[in-house]
Image (cartoon, helix red, strand yellow):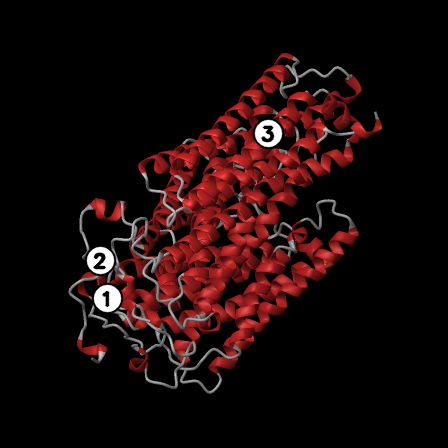
Amino acid sequence: MPSSTVLIPPHHYLNDGYGIKSWLLTRDHKRIALLYLASVTFFFFVGGAMAVLIRLDLATPAGDLVTDETYNKLFTMHGVMMVFFFLIPAIPSVLGNFLVPIMIGAKDLAFPKLNLFSWYIFVTGGLFTLYALITGGVDTGWTFYTPFSTVSSTTNVIPTALGIFITGFSSILTGLNFIVTIHRMRAPGMTWFRMPLFLWSTYATSLINVLGTPVIAITVLLVAFERVFHFGFFDPRLGGDPVLFQHMFWFYSHPAVYIMVLPAMGVISELVAAGCRKPVFGYPFVAFASLAIAVLGFLVWGHHMFVAGESVYSAMIFSILSFLVAIPSAVKVFNWTATMYKGAVSWDTAMLYAYGFIGLFTIGGLTGLFLAAIGLDVHVTDTYFIIAHFHYIMVGGTIMGYLGGLHYWWPKISGRLYNEALAKLSAGIIFIGFNLTFFPQFVVGYLGMPRRYHAYPPDFQVLNVLSSAGASILGVGYLLPMFYLMWSLRYGRLAGSNPWGAVGLEWTTTSPPPTENFTQTPIVTWEAYDYRAPAEGHVA
Amino acid sequence: MLPEAAHHPHVPGLAHHFDNLEQQAEATTLGMWVFLVTEVLFFGGLFLVYTVYRTWYPEAFAAASHSLDITLGTINTAVLITSSLTMALAVHAAQLGQRKLLMLFLVATMALGLVFLGIKSVEYYQKFVEHHVPGPSFHFEEPQYAVHAQIFFSLYFLMTGLHALHMIIGFGIMTFMLWWAWRGTITAEYYSPIEIAGLYWHFVDIVWIFLFPLLYLLGRHAH
């Protein structure tokens, strides 16, 4: 039966129970994905509100909107909210949760109850952090550098640290769930090299989650204990070493950058293949590049300490290793570009985000090479150059990938199509707003404007005003999808099971999928991205 | 392969989204191994801190280590290794479907765990009396080592405290297992919960096997 005739199935996961209990006690990975979608969106806008205030303050050199103390709290909470409660969980727990079982032809993740539990942990951690925010905030920066965080700061370090500690378990358990699911739950015929590349990058991300997150957990626990019991691990007066904290912090927090960007890379592989009607060029290279990034990502943390009294030899080794990460990253960029070559390149919304990702990630990645070079890094350390660099990776990379994926799979999630024209418009607004916000920061940083100050010399005002103007455009761009996606839930055209004519198991089931994803366990007999055969031929 | 064969709702212990008990057992075992990897990294952070400060302050660490009660520490090591034996026997009994024997070994494991925790609290109490708990009232007999001995004791309490917390969680898990065994949920076909609970228990033991020499036996070879 051609899928186009059945536009919406009578029974699917969204109408399988309506009450609040059917959501809060659900074990369906798709419903849990939507719970995450609501929570990460909430935290995104909380973190975004801080960014609005930061950019407003920086519109004038004098720093007259907020006091320096408030400013410190604003950028700290912006960082904490965005990193731990949006960027790290967003793609894995929303898109990953929804797609991992469907893409491998399974009925659910290996541990559905654990999956729901992870969401509750996540929300509990978030509430702790919100509590810290509402009762006065925290001013250490999201990096919690010692001994300021353990000895001097009088703000809410402990509740924030506990919030991050708790949320860490949600990352660990979600990663564990994905690893086991990908190992043990694949449908007959779904070999490792037939898996969509999104799963390879989700798998690589999960490895980092499982190996790295416990280290940040113990590290923030040590900070909390040190504040309460004066242990002295990181306090020089008691024989401790503050740089040890930096090592432990970045041992997780640098790989965390790859936790944020690897899933986005996976999304882009899917978007590029579907948008060009071609298999991803050099599939095994892209797959192994994900693993290579995960492994190398654990070996570069020292490049955050080039000016922190690190020995020159470790600095040189960390510098070389940091350059090496560029290789698998570039492999991906080249392979996506090669996929587009002579492809039937589309200009759908999802593809616009993919183009945006590739361009912005390339800029973010290349400026990363500046920072891996020790001499240059000394010049730009703690300036807006760094801020611009990592926002190109995290906002230009991760959020572009997240929004692209959300648009691409939205018909599958909701069963409905959004307004394409509005979606393209907001993709354009986001791209322009993003570049206007962050490109001037490269310049102003290179000229010497330090990060984390609420006032600056008047010479830097033009660039800062450009940046603040860009931020307001970016804000509009982020609000628009909220409205037209919500609108589509009720008024959007029915999507049918495969609105994009894409291949992959998720497009062989109905939109929205049934609670157990497939009416029959699929048997996979084709390779990934098999665009030579018509999509209907894939229904086993 | 008939996909319909997956819909057999009445296999006891089989969750709806698995095809069969074998797949389910493989998945839960792998899940526990991955969790233990996480635990290794969690304790790993503390082992790193330990390594750094022991390398920096070897004399203070040795002096502080000597104040620990090596007899109680050794007894506790023996108690814990024995509990690993009873745990392994419990898994064996579960595989054979010997319900009473399984319950007996689970109770033995829990009892040994309690003995361990009891001895540990006696040791904590001694440290408290000797003012070896880090903080304002900390006092160390050899003043030249006092500052750095406090780092040793901070690590001692953190590492053994986290270990004890894991023991308590393990005790909770064993209580559940005992309840399941008593109820008859655990059978010769469905024993993977006992197996993965055993993995966890052995892991907590192994952590102690590292903690004991690192904390109790420092610098002893010289005397």
> Which is more toward the observer, A227 or A389?
A227
Tell me how far mark 1 sits from mark 2, CA to CA.
Answer: 10 Å
Q: Which chain carries label 2?
A: A
In the picture of the structure, the residue carrying the numbered disc 3 is B160
- Residue in view at x 53 percent, y 62 percent: A439
**Mark 1 packing: few (<14 Cα in 10 Å), some, or many (20+)?**
many
What secondary structure is marked by label 3?
Answer: helix
Chain identifier of the residue bearing label 3 in the image: B
Whether callout 3 and callout 1 share a subunit is answered no
Chain containing mark 1: A
Q: According to the image, label 2 marks what residue?
A: A14
Q: Distance between the residues labelled 3 and 2?
A: 48 Å
Is any atom of residue B184 visible in this view?
Answer: yes
Q: Residue at the location (63% across, 69% down)?
A: A327
Up/down of A171 relative to A278, above or below: above
Residue A132: mark in rendering: none
Where residue A540 appears, as percent x and y from the top left, is 30, 77
Q: Which amino acid does label 3 sit on?
A: Thr
Residue B132 found in image quarter = top right
**Quadrant of res B203:** top right
Q: Mark 1 points at which residue?
A: A415
| Residue A523 image offset from top left, x and y in percent | 34, 73
Q: Is residue A56 visible?
A: no
